Image: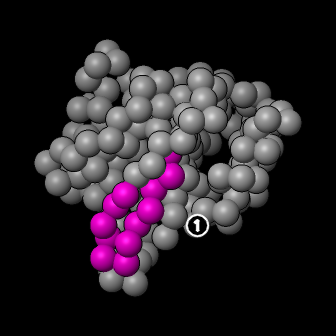
Amino acid sequence: MRLAVISDSHLSGPDERFCALYDEYLAPTDVLLHCGDMVGASLYHYLSRHKRFLCVRGNCDHFALDHELPLTLSRELELPGGGLKVGIAHGWGERSTVWKRVADTFPAHDLVCFGHTHRRHWAEHQGSWMLNPGSLAEGSLALLDVADDGTLSCTFVDI
């Protein structure tokens, strides 16, 4: 299984560059996660065409759907060898400790994805893998390969 994880796109709608990026990196994945700060409903609707799109609201998501998007989201993704428990949040507070606050929100999760800091982060913390893909607006996304046994492998992509 392959997941694309993006955050902090800060786009009101898809532009030509974003559409090309979507076609190359996001559309082919099994799951697309957005960790908040899409900024516009037009981008949300564009991303919603993905076969498995999951997202949360960020601190800059002040558009028509902002009250419908959850602040946090927890899902179990099915794998041949079991499940992968995934938590998604944007993040809040002091940037240097965002990862810790988000980790505390999702105890006993295999993978916790977050944004807000615009900084890449991939580290294990108390049995959970913490992933911040960086800011899409600043040229970063993450591709996560999940083996049947739940083993995770993360690749950051410069765009």
Task: Tell whether 126 sits left or right of 137.
Answer: left
The secondary structure type at the circle numbered 1 is loop
Look at the image and tell me whether residue 136 can be seen.
no
Could you say which is closer to the camera, residue 2 or residue 51? Answer: 2
Task: Tell whether 94 sits left or right of 88.
Answer: left
> Please, is residue 49 above or below residue 64 in the view?
below
Could you say which is closer to the camera, residue 148 or residue 36? Answer: 148
Quadrant of the image containing the C terminus: top right
> Please, is residue 7 above or below residue 154 in the view?
above
| Colour option used | one colour
Residue with the mark numbered 1? 30
> For the point 45% across and 56% down, which residue is it?
144
Task: Tell whether 159 sits left or right of 135.
Answer: right
**Residue projecting furthest to the bottom:** 80
> For the point 22% across and 39% down, which residue is it?
104
Could you say which is closer to the camera, residue 103 or residue 16? Answer: 16
Tell me residue 38's x, y (percent): 65, 33
> For the point 76% across and 28% down, which residue is it?
12
**Residue projecting furthest to the left:** 126
Tell me residue 93's x, y (percent): 34, 18
Q: Residues within 10 Å of mark 1 (few under 14, many from 20)?
A: some
Look at the image and tell me whether residue 122 can be seen.
yes
> Please, is residue 146 above or below residue 105 in the view?
below
Q: Residue 150: say if magenta.
A: yes
> For the point 27% across and 56% down, which residue is it?
109
Q: Amino acid at mark 1?
A: Asp
Q: Residue 115: say if magenta.
A: no
What span is colored magenta in the figure? Answer: 142-153
Tell me residue 23's x, y (percent): 76, 53
**Residue projecting furthest to the top:** 94
Task: Tell whether 39 sits left or right of 158.
Answer: right
